[in-house]
Amino acid sequence: MSHRAALTPQMLQYAAKFDDRGDIRWLPYLMYFHATDHRSEVINTDRLGFRISHGPDGQRASAGGQLPDGPVRLLAGSSTAFGIGATGDEHTLSSYLWSKHAQSVPWLNFAGRSHNSTQELLLFLLYRHLLPQIDEIVIFSGFNNLGLSRLPASVRGDHGAFFNCSDFFDQMEELSARHRKASGGFGRFGGRRQTGTPATYTTVPELSEQIDLASGLTLRHLDSWRLLAEGMGAKLTFVLQPLATWVREEPAPQEKKLFEELDKISNFGEVYGDISSMGAREAYSKALQTGCEQIGVRYFDLNPALADAIGAKDWLFVDRIHFTDVGHDLVADLLAEHLGVS
């Protein structure tokens, strides 16, 4: 049996069941979202694909399901905020915040797996009308924008690259080619040709350029979040999410086994090597903090706080970016403390 199957059996549900590309919900504008009404012992979603949060006394809530009458707090972001790695819905960050560390106001899971900051903002714009009064918005994110900034300008476009973008551009180029062939060069688009987008990418921007691109895009969207939050009278905080290699140099024993095994079946080190260093995190965090101060958004880099709170053998990560149940619990506790919420 593999270390992954032995140490993190719940990940088989995420990888083999929940992340089936055939079940992804393809949505206009947003590109993609989670499967709707997904049911398992590990993960459950509502009619729209939002993950269900658990509160005290058996309470449950989600943006597309049962909602409390009073104000709510939102945890936005991508897969880490969504709770990949948790053995059940009750062990995600939003659930631990609501059920244990900051119980006074319900927390909703408003995260999207594999979303960048453009998609995080669009998700809120598309579904804000469903929500009651919002007391607080916490955006727990940052890594995806940095990882995607490694892609070339041809796929980053004006609003940043997104995961699975090679599939999208390849399919759109095939569609354009069929229309060009059918119209003989004279049609709705006047025979205009696009150059297409390669399916593989070889040119990676320098690290400093990646940080500039990622922080600039993140801050642009945070400024829009700020305007929306001010209009609703909600507090807004951006939290730079932890990465295992941003938290400590030497992983816990279980993490070491998992990372070594995962490296044999994925290319994380090859793809993300330069941005996964402590120095890259420091430079990225400095750029984000400076920008947040300029636009008036509260900023919190969770990596140093998490590093200070753990011992050398504390097992927090199921892979380099997603938490164990213990990790979720500890991070929720740190969030509540540093946000000053109860």
Image: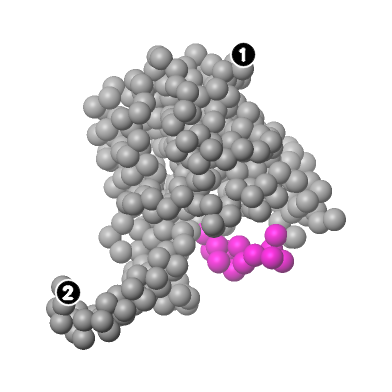
Q: Position of residue 63 (x, y in %)?
A: 43, 30
> What secondary structure characterizes most of the magenta part?
helix
Evaluate if marks 1 and 2 touch, with contact meaning CB atoms under 8 Å apart. Answer: no
Position of residue 216 relative to residue 177, above or below, is above
Which element carries disc 2, helix, strand or loop?
Answer: loop
Q: Is residue 272 magenta?
A: yes
Residue ID at (54%, 57%): 21
Q: Residue at x 39, y 17 (%)?
A: 71
297 vs 41, left or right, is left
Residue closest to the far bottom: 184
Local crowd size for mark 1, using a 10 Å CA cut-off: few (<14), some (14–19), many (≥20): few
Mark 1 and mark 2: Cα distance apart in space: 59 Å
132 drawn magenta: no
The amino acid pointed to by label 2 is Phe
Seen at 78% across and 51% down, the residue is: 5
Q: Is residue 211 visible?
A: no
Amino acid beneath label 1: Asp
Question: Compared to 141, does 178 lie above or below?
Answer: below
Magenta range is: 262-275
Residue that label 2 marks: 189
Q: Position of residue 165 (x, y in %)?
A: 42, 64
- Number of numbered markers: 2
Tag 1, which secondary structure?
A: helix
- Which residue ends up furthest to the front in the rendered image? 182
* Corner quadrant of residue 57: top right
